[in-house]
Image (cartoon, rainbow, N blue to C red):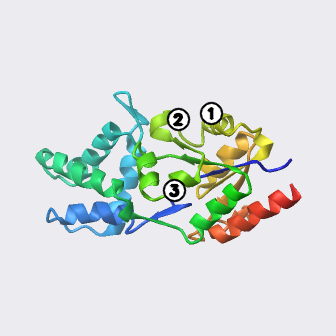
Amino acid sequence: MALKAIFIDVGNTLLYEKPSRFEIYAERARARDLRLETSAMRGLMHRAHRELPREIGGAFRYSDLWFNSYIERIFHDYLGILKTEMAPLREELFGRFSDPATFGVFDGGIEMLEEWRARGLKIGIVSNWSARLPGLLDRLGLSERVDFVLCSALERLEKPDTVLFERALQRAGVRPDEALHAGDDFEKDVLGAQRAGIRAVLVDHARRADPSRTPRVENLFELREVVAGLMQHG
């Protein structure tokens, strides 16, 4: 079936952080006289993510209220920073992740979106992200290059939930066999999309995935070629 729509993830697919979120959090700890390596902070952040539920007091994951608990879990519960420091910490971190300078577009990303738009494809962002995503994309000049943005914190749904992918299909006005989803997480992006009947490509910039997991690309130039091939051959 002819390809009519592309859905694409954001973090580690279309955008990268500079420096990583783990380093940004570690910087905030070191600014408060804690000696903490980035690798140690990575472990604490993964631990907090595992321990906290998807909803806290009705606040969905990655909403500001959810992040309040996440930040407190890391910096107060794990690292012992006083609760009086939580408000300035939150302000610093929220500001950093709202700043377009914290993010870069992977090479070829802008040209890829423009080519897809020129080919008449519907383009949708489908991402597990905070409610700041639409504003961030606007400041990065990406909003004008896509047709819609589905952000988990706003939709109160997150990948790999098939309902989120079904919502993307509705927004694009296409059937599952007319769409392709691209993202960096095998479970959330590839399997999630496939369960909704959508073709999927794993975008493995870091080259960490099993090469046997296909279809798989290592950069956006290769993704662009995959899409061109699908448009040509269906």
Rate crowding at label 3 as few (under 14), some (14 to 19) or many (20 or more) other CA atoms within 10 Å.
Answer: some
Side of 35 relative to 146 (left or right)? left
Mark 2 or mark 3, which is nearer to you? 3
Tag 3, which secondary structure? loop
User: Badges 1 and 2: C-beta atoms under 8 Å apart?
Assistant: yes
Tag 1, which secondary structure? helix
Pointer 2 or 3: first along the chain: 3
Look at mark 1 in the image and give the residue it sits on: 163
Q: CA distance from mark 1 to mark 2?
A: 8 Å
Q: Residue furthest top?
A: 58
Q: What x and y, as percent, mark residue 65? A: 31, 37
Please identify the quarter of the rendering in which residue 60 is found.
Answer: top left
Q: Nearer the viewer, residue 120 or 168?
A: 120
Identify residue type, mark 3.
Leu
Tag 2, which secondary structure? loop
Residue 164 lies, with reference to residue 232, above or below; the image says above
Q: Which mark is residue 124?
A: none
Residue at the image point whose x is 63% and y is 67% from the top: 220
The quarter of the picture where the C terminus appears is: bottom right
Q: CA distance from mark 2 to mark 3?
A: 22 Å
Pointer 3 or 1: first along the chain: 3
Rate crowding at label 1 as few (under 14), some (14 to 19) or many (20 or more) other CA atoms within 10 Å.
Answer: some
Look at mark 2 in the image and give the residue it sits on: 157
Residue at the image point whose x is 28% and y is 54% from the top: 95
Q: Nearer the viewer, residue 219 or 61?
A: 219
Look at mark 3 in the image and give the residue it sits on: 142
